[in-house]
């Protein structure tokens, strides 16, 4: 799995502001309103305990401080534990945290200690980016393209199917594609008969996953993927509305998901 780097997390709130403006223009709602609608919850005065985790590749510079900045941005109190791992967990619970946030290389979770709810970053990220794509105000069909059916993409595809969209999908991994077809009823994208979409949800760790033939002239690409799968020239030429941000949107969804 591709891990975040400290550079990805530079100027995280500036990137959020830029993306929130695009989301507002493209959907008529901001990220907070979209999270509230999807999860039916509102953030209150929860206290967020952030525990740095040293397992695997260890601490990522700017990761815990970015989570704290996100909590603050959404009006919540938060703290980073002085110690890491189990000792940090103990400190967070003793520090009266309502919600714990912590990540190793495979799993990034929010755990609400008051109601027991746990949310994972991959599902919440998939759901919220798919939801953003599906709210494109210039779309005049219910056809949406999902590129990548891994951990994030599958969750997003499932959300779109549940919402009643016609979900077309592509993944070079034939097993993943078959599984999504069988379990969710997605329509495998026919690469021999290109179709242009005005709503695209992309969730891969690769660049250039979106080709010219896939996007309509006016379209929204909503992608958590790092690096971005939309080639610059296609984005500029077709004036694509692009939502792409490395952390905050997914974390906003996680916080709303555990309330
Ligand atoms: P994953 O490895 O589980 O799934 C990626 C999928 O993309 C695989 O099934 C792979 O076969 C597929 N893929 C690769 N090339 C493709 C192509 N050209 N066309 C279609 N599908 C292709 O990865 P995961 O966990 O789903 O994450 C996806 C991306 O999202 C990663 O870059 C990850 O770092 C990023 N991510 C970003 C977050 C954010 O907040 N911005 C949060 C979580 C993940
Ligand atoms: O890098 C990742 C995920 C994050 C998805 C959110 N965009 N791709 N996970 C590793 C996080 C490791 C954090 C580290 N253990 C720490 O600093 O606590």
Image (spheres, rainbow, N blue to C red):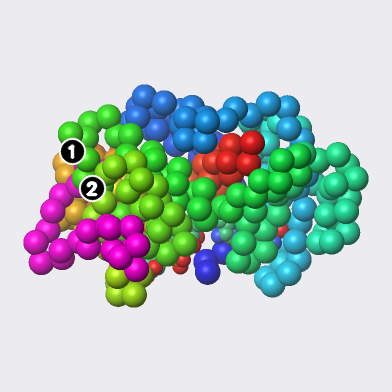
Q: Which residues are magenta?
A: 179-199
Would you call the spot at circle 2 few (<14 residues within 10 Å), some (14-19), or many (20 or more)? some
- Residue that badge 2 annotates: 166
22, 49: nearer the viewer: 49
Indicate the secondary structure of the residue bearing disc 2.
strand
Report if the CB atoms under discs 1 and 2 are less than 8 Å apart.
yes
188, 85: nearer the viewer: 188
The label nearer to you, 1 versus 2, is: 2
Q: Is residue 179 left or right of residue 109?
A: left
Measured as percent of width and height from the top left, residue 42 is found at: 60, 27
Residue 163 is inside the magenta segment: no
Sequence-wise, the earlier of marks 1 and 2 is 1
Residue 182 is inside the magenta segment: yes
Count the numbered circles shown.
2
Indicate the secondary structure of the residue bearing disc 1.
loop
Q: Is residue 175 left or right of residue 152?
A: left
Q: Is residue 48 left or right of residue 163?
A: right
What's the residue at 41%, 26% (across, down)?
29
- Residue that badge 1 annotates: 141
Q: Residue furthest left?
A: 193
Measured as percent of width and height from the top left, residue 22 is found at: 38, 33
């Amino acid at each position: 799995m591709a891990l975040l780097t400290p550079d990805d997390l530079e100027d995280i709130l500036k990137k959020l502001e830029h993306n929130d403006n695009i989301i507002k223009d493209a959907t008529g709602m901001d990220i907070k309103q979209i999270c509230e609608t999807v999860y039916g919850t509102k953030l209150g005065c929860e206290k967020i305990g952030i525990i740095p985790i040293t397992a695997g590749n260890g601490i990522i510079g700017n990761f815990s401080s970015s989570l704290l900045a996100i909590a603050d941005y959404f009006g919540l109190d938060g703290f980073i534990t002085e110690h890491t791992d189990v000792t940090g967990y103990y400190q967070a619970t003793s520090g009266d945290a309502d919600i714990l946030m912590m990540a190793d290389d495979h799993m990034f979770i929010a755990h609400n200690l008051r109601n027991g709810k746990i949310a994972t970053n991959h599902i919440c990220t998939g759901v919220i980016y798919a939801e953003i794509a599906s709210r494109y105000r210039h779309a005049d069909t219910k056809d949406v393209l999902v590129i990548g059916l891994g951990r994030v993409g599958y969750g997003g595809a499932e959300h779109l199917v549940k919402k009643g969209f016609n979900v077309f999908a592509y993944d070079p991994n034939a097993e993943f594609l078959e599984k999504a077809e069988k379990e969710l009823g997605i329509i495998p994208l026919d690469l021999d008969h290109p179709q242009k979409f005005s709503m695209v949800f992309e969730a891969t760790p690769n660049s250039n996953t979106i080709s010219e033939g896939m996007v309509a002239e006016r379209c929204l690409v909503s992608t958590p993927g790092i690096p971005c799968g939309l080639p610059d020239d296609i984005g500029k030429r077709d004036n694509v509305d692009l939502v792409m941000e490395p952390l905050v949107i997914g974390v906003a969804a996680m916080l709303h998901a555990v309330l």
